[in-house]
Image (cartoon, helix red, strand yellow):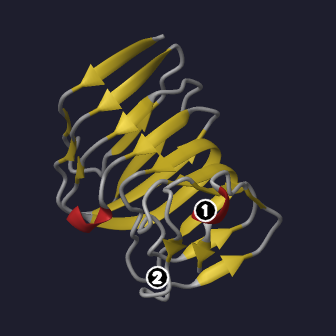
Amino acid sequence: GYTLRIPTLNWYPVNGNPINVALYPTNAGVVVDQLNFTYNTGAQYLILDGTSAGNVVNVVTVPTWLYVTKQGTSTWTWNAYASSYLMGDVLINGGNLIVNGALGVQSGRAVTLQSGTLHCNNPDALKTALTITGGSLENSSGAPITTSPYNPAQNWNGNFAFNGSLGANSDLDL
């Protein structure tokens, strides 16, 4: 298939309103090397949607809260590290989200897995509050996912599957 590579994607507010960005590829992958939100007050919303595979977000800069929703049947790879900005809630509601960076959300916020699959390719990918109400969790990092040094809240409120495709190298230390 085809891949659209976007070196830098800048989003500016309109009339002082927060920015909502939806990336919805259907027939090609999208690679965003740098996604810059420039609005410095209020929440920013990033929706990762679509039906294609091969979608990547490498770096995100945002001066305020960023809320991320992963929906649709697409596969997105998240290479960004949350320490460079303030993460609000992260909702996974379909498809695949592969986390090579980290989804570290702020206190009182959570990563919520409702459906789809959350792939953790980094042992620190889940050093945050986690709520599971459905879907699948996969540790494909090759090392145990460990949240214990961070002691985040865990709410396992529904049926879910743990894939564990790497056997003993897929351990979870939650």
Q: Is residue 144 left or right of residue 88?
A: right
Q: Vertically, is 14 above or below 146? A: above
Q: Are marks 1 and 2 in contact (CB under 8 Å)?
A: no
Q: Return the residue found at the far top.
A: 1
Q: Residue at x 34, y 17 (%)?
A: 4
Q: Residues within 10 Å of mark 2 (few under 14, many from 20)?
A: few
Residue 14, image quadrant: top left
Question: What percent of the width, then of the height, locates residue 128?
Answer: 46, 75
Q: Quadrant of the C terminus?
A: bottom right
Q: Residues under labels 1 and 2: Cα distance?
A: 28 Å
Residue 114, image quadrant: bottom right
The residue lying toward the viewer, choosing from 1 and 10, is 1
Q: Residue at x 49, y 89 (%)?
A: 151
What kind of element bears circle 1? helix
Question: What percent of the width, then of the height, locates residue 130?
Answer: 57, 73
Q: Return the residue found at the far front.
A: 168
Q: What residue is disc 1 on? A: 170
Q: Is residue 49 left or right of residue 58?
A: right
Question: What percent of the width, then of the height, locates residue 101?
Answer: 36, 56
Q: Residue at x 26, y 67 (%)?
A: 83
Name the kind of residue labelled 2 in the image.
Gly
Q: What residue is disc 2 on? A: 108
Q: Is residue 147 left or right of residue 62?
A: right
